[in-house]
Image: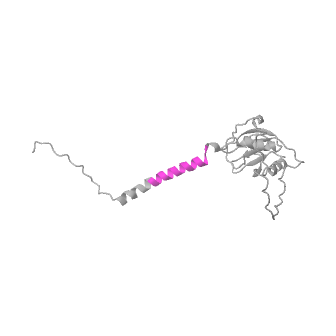
Amino acid sequence: MSSGPEAPRRPVSHRAPVGAHESARRLVPPLAAVAAVVLVIVLLLVLNGPAHTSGPGPALQPPSSVPTSSSPSVAPTPPPSPRPGRTAPVEPPPATATAAVAKVPVTVLNNSRRSGLASRAAGQLQHGGWPIAQVGNFRGRLPVSTLYYATGQADVAKALARQFAAVQRVRPRFSGLPGSGLTLVVTREWPA
């Protein structure tokens, strides 16, 4: 027996040393699980962003907030001047609402993350002769700008869609849709 201090003992490992290849192989399942969770979160954020929650619940504004003269109009740009020696193609004039169809008030709702899009679209409609009933936001998800019409207003809706090419679908109204009569829900592809 010695009376001096003992040398510190090295801890004893009961595992065999692991090689670099085996360590990397053990990390694959946890890293794959983390990547899958991150991917699911990103997909959920993209698909269910705050501007696309389900259910109609627009915040409507009175038509007095619709810009009038300062809003851009939906007018075709003039064709470029023809080069010498070539004739310019003759294009038909833009389609407009027929005189036989009375223009009725339209509710315009924004279904995009573009702030103020409904107001700009309402200004374009107003410039085209359509009275505006309300302007607001639409909560839900629509793939393209859609015009909804009440019973008996299909011809009026089609006339508005002919006048504004950005209206990509015309459908009957559904229960819970804000406004009455014609309701235009504009999406991010609407020109502004």
Is 88 one of the magenta-colored residues? Answer: no
Looking at the image, residue 182 lies above or below residue 88: above
Q: Quadrant of residue 130?
A: top right
Q: Residue furthest bottom?
A: 85
Q: Position of residue 63 (x, y in %)?
A: 77, 36
Q: Residue furthest right?
A: 100
Is 42 one of the magenta-colored residues? Answer: yes
Query: Could you tell me which quadrant the N terminus lies in?
Result: top left
Q: Nearer the viewer, residue 65 or 7?
A: 65
Q: Position of residue 163 (x, y in %)?
A: 81, 50
**Where are the magenta residues, as a range?**
31-49
Q: Could you tell me if residue 181 is visible in this image?
A: no
Q: Nearer the viewer, residue 165 or 42?
A: 165
The secondary structure making up most of the magenta span is helix
Q: Quadrant of residue 22?
A: bottom left
Q: Could you tell me if residue 135 is visible in this image?
A: yes
Left or right of 18, for residue 3: left
Q: Nearer the viewer, residue 177 or 93?
A: 93
Q: Residue furthest front?
A: 84
Q: Position of residue 113 (x, y in %)?
A: 65, 44
Q: Position of residue 118 (x, y in %)?
A: 72, 42
Q: Nearer the viewer, residue 9 or 56?
A: 9
Q: How many marks?
A: 0
- Picture residue at 54% right of the left edge, 50% below the top: 40
